[in-house]
Image: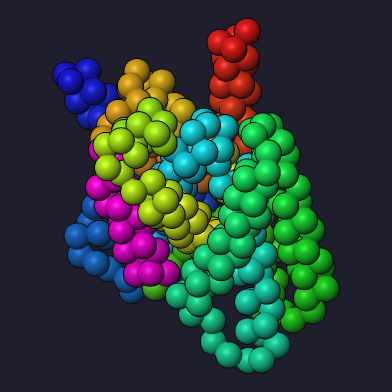
Amino acid sequence: MKRKTVLFIIMTAVIILLVVINICTGSVSVSPSEILHIIMSGDHDSYMGRIILDIRLPRIVQAAFLGGGLALSGYLLQTFFNNPIAGPYILGISSGAKLFVAILMVVSVGYGFVLRSWMMVAAAFIGALMATSFVLLVSSRVRSMAVLIVCGVMIGYICSAVTDFLVTFADDNNIVNLHNWSLGTFSAASWDDAVCYIPVVAAGFIAAFLMSKTIEVYAFGEDHAYTLGVNVKAFRLVLILVSSLLSATVAAFAGPVSFVGIAMPHVARTVLRSSDPRAVIPASFMLGMAFCLLSDMLARSLFAPTELSISTVTAVFGAPIVIGMLLKRRRADG
């Protein structure tokens, strides 16, 4: 217990450090004392005030909350399929959400209506559910997780291809940002969007944490859960709905972000040396926050003023973690 407490304190300190570094770094450097003065005074009128309060802070908040939400979505999917390789990006769920948001963006320009945040989340949720339904259909027909992952990757490629088609032939100037969004980015963050995604992610976290005991029971198998009075069908439905809503929210505001959902829950279990959901759920969330804050900082600063897509950076760090996890499982099975 003492070890876990220390680890959570360290994770909290790392997140705070990354927040400070993200605020200070950029095309314009700002000292911590100046940042503190701007935040305390709420100065939106000055040049530096607009940079800190209207550009950097919304981006930091978005990277933190959506990163945490995506890691939590991956954890719930791994619980659902009882396999640590499952994740919203790998199974094509993020790509399905991305496709429907892209369609909504194109339609909004074509018909001239104002695009609202809730519309984007709703469209992404529908896309995520459709992709999830396909994955569930395949999972009911095959027992091999490898085949399921291949099918998820294929549906992801199909959705990405259709999205790229929309981006290529979109001729309106208002669709220019669609290309950057389709690659994954936190650059369009705003406080207006935060009002929408923060409650959704917070509700998802609370729902997941309230299911901790049931998740622990479910980990021993469906039959064991049945004997203890768990309504497995209802539980699995809630798992997939919460996971889809979280991954859809991320896709709606940041586009597809790779490897966070699959890698961070694994890192949480490894660091904690435990599979207790009451510890792994908050740890996964916090590691997702830290990972996306670090990745976003690197994406916008490594080759400034050119900005990398967030998925480019998360893939560089996340893919080796997944490969290591696969090799570890292979040694364990062998």
- Magenta extent: 193-215
226 sits to left or right of 29? left
How many marks do you count on the picture?
Answer: 0
Q: In terms of image quadrants, where is residue 61?
A: bottom left
In depth, the one of 258 and 12 nearer the eye is 258
Q: Quadrant of the C terminus?
A: top right
Relative to 308, residue 245 above or below: below
Whole-percent x, y for residue 319 in the image: 62, 30
176 sits to left or right of 286? right
Whole-percent x, y for residue 76 in the image: 43, 43
Q: Quadrant of the N terminus?
A: top left
Q: In terms of image quadrants, where is residue 180?
A: bottom right
* Residue lying at 76% horizontally and 68% vertically, measured from the top left: 167
**In this rendering, does residue 64 appear at all?**
no
327 sits to left or right of 59? right
Relative to 188, residue 31 above or below: above
